[in-house]
Image (cartoon, rainbow, N blue to C red):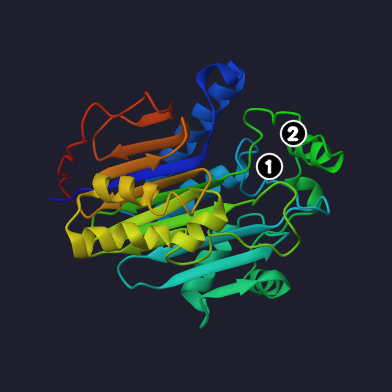
């Protein structure tokens, strides 16, 4: 008798329902549904949590609606740079990349690092050379840049400080957490960074315990929002610590981590967590978080707005092998 579940996020932003174009809203929902299905199908076939979170994040890295891979934000120089991390809750092995430019799927490079490299984190050209050595697909700069992100970058360059950013063109991160039929947890996070960030800037995503963490004993966590604050608060590990050492529930630990050091750590933040039963928790201090969840034999849940909630914590149905 087995159980499995997956949950995803694609960024938390300060938005209100009337501020988002309906067509874009529908595109977000479809993109989330597609990514959720990619990961869930892996689990349904008996695949590992590690493979499931990679599949879900791959889907979002290919989708230009999301800020990871294709559709990433542009740096001060008008270039794309990617960070990603993946963690196996069973072995505590990790793979992470920072500042890569040409790798089509940064999360897959992170996974290859986890599986084949003696190091945990590779950056820049060293990471790209490792991708080449392992036959991972690369793309030219034009593949990653979308008109929307180019416009957002131009706005910054022209110093239109008083102009409100277009809803949906904000900077953010994608991620996934999963539980497989063998009881293993995994977490994966991938990002295109911030619009107009300095060349070489690395956020919280590839910092283990900052933006990404998984441990079979307790939970798996993927964060989104303003990376510097999440990194300084070590928020992914805080969720784990509050559950393990203070006996907080998954939802309580996630919500507390969102508010942790709120007087010192300003800015948007969102946290996706999953416990050893496959229950998921979404916490965010914005009115908007792109998110999804599906457990074994249950209908998929996809949501954007704070008012959209699971009616109750999903009861995982046990599955025969």
Residue 20 x, y percent position in the rendering: 59, 21
- Quadrant position of residue 19: top right
Residue 60 x, y percent position in the rendering: 55, 43
Q: Residue at x 37, y 42 (%)?
A: 283
Q: Nearer the viewer, residue 63 or 166?
A: 166
Mark 1 surroundings: few (<14), some (14-19) or many (≥20) residues within 10 A: many
- Quadrant position of residue 91: bottom left
Residue 244 x, y percent position in the rendering: 21, 63
Residue 261 x, y percent position in the rendering: 41, 54
Circle 2 SS class:
helix
Q: Nearer the viewer, residue 8 or 4?
A: 8
First in sequence: mark 1 vs mark 2:
1
- Residue 316 vertical position relative to residue 257 in the rendered view, above or below: above
Q: Tell me, yes or no, if residue 50 can be seen here.
A: no
Give the residue number, with chain letter if any, for mark 1: 71
Structural distance between the alpha carbons of marks 1 and 2: 8 Å
Q: Tell me, yes or no, if residue 232 can be seen here.
A: yes
- Residue 75 vertical position relative to residue 87 in the rendered view, above or below: above
Circle 1 SS class:
loop
Q: Residue furthest left?
A: 1
Q: Nearer the viewer, residue 21 or 298?
A: 21
- Whether the residues at callouts 1 and 2 have beta carbons within 8 Å, the answer is yes
Q: Nearer the viewer, residue 173 or 114?
A: 173
Give the residue number, with chain letter if any, for mark 2: 148
Q: Residue at x 49, y 62 (%)?
A: 232
Mark 2 surroundings: few (<14), some (14-19) or many (≥20) residues within 10 A: some
């Amino acid at each position: 008798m087995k159980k499995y579940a997956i949950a995803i996020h694609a960024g938390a932003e300060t938005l209100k329902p009337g501020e988002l174009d309906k067509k874009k809203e529908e595109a977000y929902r479809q993109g989330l549904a597609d990514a959720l299905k990619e990961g869930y199908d892996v689990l349904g076939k008996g695949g590992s949590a590690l493979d499931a979170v990679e599949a879900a994040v791959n889907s979002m890295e290919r989708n230009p609606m999301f800020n990871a891979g294709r559709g990433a934000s542009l740096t001060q120089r008008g270039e794309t740079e990617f960070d990603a991390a993946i963690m196996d809750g069973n072995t505590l092995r990790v793979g992470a990349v920072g500042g890569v430019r040409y790798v089509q799927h940064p999360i897959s490079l992170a996974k290859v690092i986890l599986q084949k490299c003696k190091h945990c984190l590779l950056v820049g050209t060293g990471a790209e050379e490792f991708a080449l050595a392992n036959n991972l697909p690369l793309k030219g700069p034009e593949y990653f840049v979308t008109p929307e992100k180019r416009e957002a970058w131009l706005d910054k360059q022209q110093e239109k400080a008083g102009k409100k950013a277009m809803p949906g063109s904000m900077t953010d991160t994608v991620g996934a957490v999963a539980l497989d039929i063998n009881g293993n947890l995994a977490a994966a996070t991938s990002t295109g960074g911030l619009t107009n960030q300095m060349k070489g800037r690395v956020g919280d995503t590839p910092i283990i315990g900052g933006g990404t963490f998984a441990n079979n004993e307790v939970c798996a966590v993927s964060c989104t929002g303003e990376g510097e604050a999440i990194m300084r608060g070590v928020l992914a590990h805080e969720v784990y610590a509050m559950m393990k050492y203070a006996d907080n529930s998954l939802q309580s630990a996630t919500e507390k981590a969102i508010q942790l050091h709120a007087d010192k750590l300003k800015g948007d933040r969102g946290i996706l967590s999953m416990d050893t039963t496959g229950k998921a928790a979404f916490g965010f201090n914005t009115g908007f978080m792109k998110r999804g969840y599906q457990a074994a034999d249950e209908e998929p849940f996809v949501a954007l707005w704070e008012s959209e909630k699971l009616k109750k914590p999903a009861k995982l149905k046990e599955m025969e092998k």
